[in-house]
Image (spheres, rainbow, N blue to C red):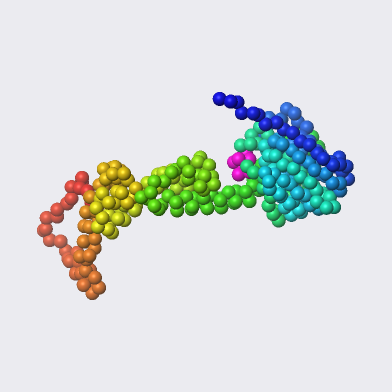
Amino acid sequence: MKEQKRRRHNYETTGDHDAAVSFHIGIWGFRDCAMLPLYPYAVEETVRRNRFTFREEFCRFLFVIMLQEGEMIYRSKGKNFRLVPGKVLLIPPGSDYSFSPGKGGYHKLVLELKGVLLDSICSGFGLREIRLFDFPQSEELISRIRGMGTDIDAKERERIPKLLGESYALLFQLAAPAREKEATKASRVLASAQMLLSRDFDRKLNFSELPAQLGVGRTTLDRLFRDKVGISPQGYRNACRIEYARELLTRSDLSIKEIAYKTGYCNQFYFSQEFRRQTGYSPHAFRLEQERIGAVYLSRPSGEDAEQEEIRSRRVSSEPLRNERIQRPRRDATFR
């Protein structure tokens, strides 16, 4: 097997990138703490008025980027992200991106998060792609990030627990829109999948093509069904087929062989096996049971007759018992 080529971090600039009006960056100074799961590596604050382009491949940090003034255009995978005050841009590790300032320059604040478990933490929070979203409490967020920059600059060990806790809390808050978007997308995918799986039983469904048809991976679809429905997509379709078979056995005069083909089973024998496995009845026994229940229901009195029957049964049951011998059921008797 050919070994996959390892991606390398790289960046380049064009134009006058170094001509900043003001620039400050506070960098994590505790080298012996570099193996922490997640920590704030740096806080950068920059004011620029010059024109330039910056491009980075396979970034090593999670970037939290905000503007206090101005405009910036970020680009990644053919998409443009217009960053303005009041919005937050999240760039996860491993991303390729570029950016350039809008007219008039910008005032930017960046938090760079790092850690040995950064990739898995981002995946757990649903931050696997670049996201731009509105953030109403932008001034509060700017203040919090600046406070983290102050603590980083102080380089005092007693501030490390506070910085670590603030990193997790901030990331959890910022990931909320991503989680909501993921949840909405998951709901749409699940609804579409259930619709496809619960119809056209007489046609063969290619399960290997279903994930691509829904725009998700096979593992994602399987996990979504197991988390939300409790069974695999194939198990869900089988359950729908059996439910449809129950309906046909109850409400139609079709033969069991016809119902087997109508629900997508290749032969009557396999259908009967699967039906018994899921319901506890053979198709024939199930149909007889439904006919018996229907007959009992139809024979029940209705209207005034039912009322009189109820009164009579209450009167009879309220009479004192004499010396009648009561026939008690055996303990192993089965009632349905």
- Residue that protrudes farthest toward the bottom in the picture: 304
From the top left corner, tell me how far across and down residue 209 is, in percent: 48, 43
Q: Which residues are magenta?
A: 121-127
- In the depicted view, which residue is nearer to us: 19 or 184? 19
Q: What is the x, y in percent for residue 32?
A: 73, 27
214 horizontally vs 53: left or right = left
Q: Is residue 177 above or below residue 157?
A: below
Q: Position of residue 76 (x, y in %)?
A: 69, 44
Q: Is residue 49 left or right of residue 77?
A: right
In this view, the residue in front, 310 or 175, is 175
User: Residue at image x 11%, y 58%?
Assistant: 324
Q: Is residue 16 magenta?
A: no
Whether residue 311 can be seen here: no
Instruction: Identify the residue shown where x is 54% and y is 47%.
Output: 215
Residue 12 figure quarter: top right
* Residue drawn at point x = 85 percent, y = 52 percent: 104
What residue is drawn where x is 49% and y is 50%? 190
Residue 126 in magenta stretch: yes
For the question of whether residue 294 can be seen, the reply is yes
Considering depth in this image, is 65 or 139 the residue closer to the camera? Answer: 65
Q: Give the image location of residue 320, x and y in percent.
A: 16, 64
**On-image quarter of the N terminus:** top right
* Nearer-the-camera pick, 175 or 155: 175
Q: How many circles with numbers are drawn on the protein?
A: 0
Up-down relation of residue 8 to residue 145 (above or below): above
Q: Is residue 49 left or right of residue 38?
A: right
